Every structure is written in C-alpha cells, then in structure tokens.
Amino acid sequence: MTTSSVNSLVQPLGEMPPDAIVFGRTEGMRAVRDRLTKLASANVPVLIQGESGTGKDIIARMIHATSPWRTGPWVKVNCPAIPGTLLESELFGYEKGAFTGAYGMKPGRVEMAHRGTLFLDEISELDMSLQSKLLQLLQDGQFCRIGAQEDKKVEVRVVCATNRKLEQEIENGTFRSDLFYRINVVNLHLPPLRERASDIPELVAYFLEYHNRKYNCRARALSSELMSELRKYHWPGNIRELENLVKRYVILGNEEVISSDLAPRATDFFNAEIPVDGQISLKKLTRQAVRELERKVILKVLQNCHWNRKQTARALSISYRALLYKIREAGLPSNRVVKRRDADSPKQDIAAD
Ligand SMILES: Nc1ncnc2c1ncn2[C@@H]1O[C@H](COP(=O)(O)OP(=O)(O)OP(=O)(O)O)[C@@H](O)[C@H]1O
Ligand SMILES: [Mg+2]
C-alpha cells in the first residue's frame, strides 16, 4: 500500500463550529451532548439520525475528535456518491487480478480506517450484499478484499448516519435488521431546526461573523423583525438552509434577500400578483422564479419516482450529485415521509423508494 493511496482516502477533519453553537441550549441537543460525552471513549458503533442539514456530519467528526482514536485516520464514505458497482471495491479493496482491470492490489477505505473512525454517510444506500459484508466487519472486525483468499482483521470505530427511517427500510425489506441492531448500539437523534428555534439568534450571529470574515464583508446584524420571522419559519433544510440564507445576505448585502427567500415558499409565485407600481428588480424576480420553478419540478419528479433519487436524477437528466445538491439548496426534505408544506404537494405520506 503506497503512502499516497493512503493519504488520498484519509481526510482532514476540517473546521468545526464551537461547541456552544453546535449544541445550543435546547433539551434535544443537550441530550445529544450528554450521550456524546459518554460514548467518546467506548469503541461502540454509533448511528446518527436526523433530517438533512441537522448536523450529522459535524457530530460524526466530533465523535472522532473526542475519541481515543482521534490521532488515527478519519475516513468518510458518502455511500450514494459512489456508484453501486464501485462501492464494494472502494470499501473493501481488491487483489491484483480480482477482475478485469485490477492490474494491482488496492486497499479499501475500511482498511484505511484502521485504528481510526470509519464514517458511513447515508448508510441506507448500501445494497444488501454490502450490508452483509459490513455486518461481518462489525461482528468480528474481519473483511475480505475482492478476489482475496483470506479475511483480514481491522480495528475500527464505525459511525453511520442516515436521514431515513431505517425501521421503515427494514419493513420494506431493503435493510437488514441484524445490521441495524449492530450499527445502532448508541443512537444519536439530531432534532430539526424548527424544534430548536430558540437557538436561531446565536446560529445567525455565528454564521454572520463567519461569512463576514470569510468573504471579507461587513454585513450588519439582522433586524429584530426579521429575526422573529426566522424563528417562526419551518426550516425544511434545517441548519444548512439557515447558513445558506445568512451567506446570501452577507454577500448580497440586504435583508430583502432573506425575506424574499422565505416568501416564495408561502406564496404560489407564478399565480401571485406581480407588483408593477414602484421599483421592480427584474433580476431579483427572475432569480426567485427560476429557483422556485426548479424546486417545484424537482419535488414533482421526486414524488413521481416515489422519492427514488437515482431515478429522479435520470428523469431530470442531471447527475445524482447535482440532484443531491439541488435538493439541499432548495431545502427539500430527503426523507420519504413528508408532511404537507407546499400548496402543491399533496397531503400524504410519500411512498418509499
Ligand atoms: N449544530 C450546528 N452548528 C453549526 N452549524 C451547523 C450545525 N449543524 C449543521 N451546521 C451547518 O449546516 C450545514 C449542514 O450540516 P451537516 O452537513 O453536518 O448536515 P447533515 O445532517 O450531515 O446533512 P445531510 O443529511 O444533508 O448530509 C453545514 O454547513 C454545517 O456547517
Ligand atoms: Mg451529511
């Protein structure tokens, strides 16, 4: 195994917000912090659940940073970002000659994470055969490179994350229940931002300071009227949506950016009266309209495809990655069970993939 191949898979932990910002003051996050403190030193698998944008990635990195293996590797695998056929070799590696094109041996990410943390993001996207291999890894710390004769042993802390309800996946027959019990030794549930509304002012102040510094801007604190709007908003994209909003405000420089970002969700943009008296910013209206149209189209196609995102990406002729990005940017939920939020989204529980 060459040093460069190891380094390319072991990622830096990256910058993290201060603990006071990450956990805030609400009961739900206090419970997360208490659990995190208790589990830090125990090498048990952890499952982090929460809606998209609630901070699962940050919490996973914190688990690594506070563990006795913090000086070891941090290896993150974003399961849906790697095509199904490649995922097995990415995770478990292969021997020379294991398949056509395997000209040399390649270690997988599981091996790279030896004496460190393996973070499996969006674990529900693993197919059944990979789930069995992961189960073996969790049961006895062993795995087998593709084409190898013998199993190898690793010591690794496995942290998984998902924004899906795995219990439902088990019922659907797409997730192994024995694997669920293995990865769910300790469960951390991250509450959605709408249940942490009292933390919004501090989060806004933090993001404002952070992005002012990053983009060398001087955007001022938000007015109290706008802050109370933010506290009432339902935040389908959670903290990611809040951060994006503050970032846009910092860069574009006026509060209208925020109010107009919140407004289209409440109104049907295309049927709304367009104000023709006074000053109209055509650029701004067009930008909002495009964003809202894109959001509606993605939502409709997601519903048509029963929230199967791979199928949706194909139907929209965009890459899977681009779709995930757009879903996040639009603040659309990526869970399949969503409650009514839009006038145009039918009031129903949306079916599974
Ligand atoms: N508690 C928090 N404090 C400060 N910033 C946060 C917090 N949680 C999330 N963020 C910010 O929100 C964004 C999304 O967070 P993160 O990637 O951890 O969410 P996630 O739950 O992994 O989302 P997804 O399910 O879409 O992968 C990041 O830019 C992160 O910096
Ligand atoms: Mg994530």
Image (cartoon, rainbow, N blue to C red):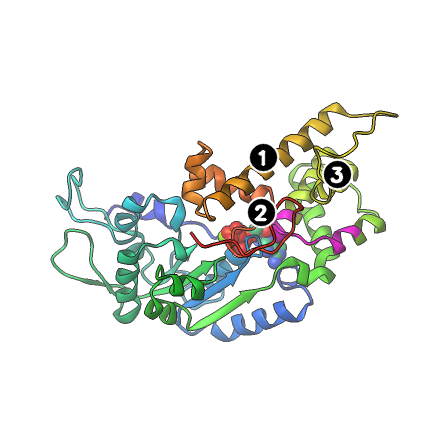
The correct choice, above or below, for 160 with respect to 353 in the image is below
Residue 166 located left or right of residue 30: left
Identified by mark 2, the residue type is Leu
The correct choice, above or below, for 254 with respect to 98 in the image is above
User: Where does label 1 land, which residue?
Assistant: 294
- Whether the residue carrying mark 1 lies under 8 Å from ligand 1 is answered with no
Q: How crowded is mark 3: few (under 14 residues within 10 Å), some or many (20 or more)?
A: few
Identified by mark 1, the residue type is Glu
The answer to which of marks 3 and 2 sits earlier in the sequence is: 3
State how far apart marks 3 and 2 are (Cα).
Answer: 17 Å
User: Where does label 3 land, which residue?
Assistant: 260
Where in the figure is residue 125, as x and y percent of width and height?
38, 53
State how far apart marks 2 and 1 are (Cα).
Answer: 11 Å
Query: Which element carries disc 1, helix, strand or loop?
Result: helix
> In this figure, what is the number of numbered marks?
3
Residue 105 located left or right of residue 293: left
Give the extent of the magenta segment.
229-241
Q: Does the magenta stretch include residue 237?
A: yes
The answer to which of marks 1 and 3 sits earlier in the sequence is: 3
User: Where does label 2 land, which residue?
Assistant: 332
Q: In which quarter of the image is residue 249?
A: top right
Using the image as rendered, state which of residue 139 and residue 162 is in the foreground.
Answer: 162
Q: Is residue 93 visible?
A: yes
State how far apart marks 1 and 3 are (Cα).
Answer: 16 Å
Identified by mark 3, the residue type is Ser
Q: Are marks 1 and 3 in contact (CB under 8 Å)?
A: no
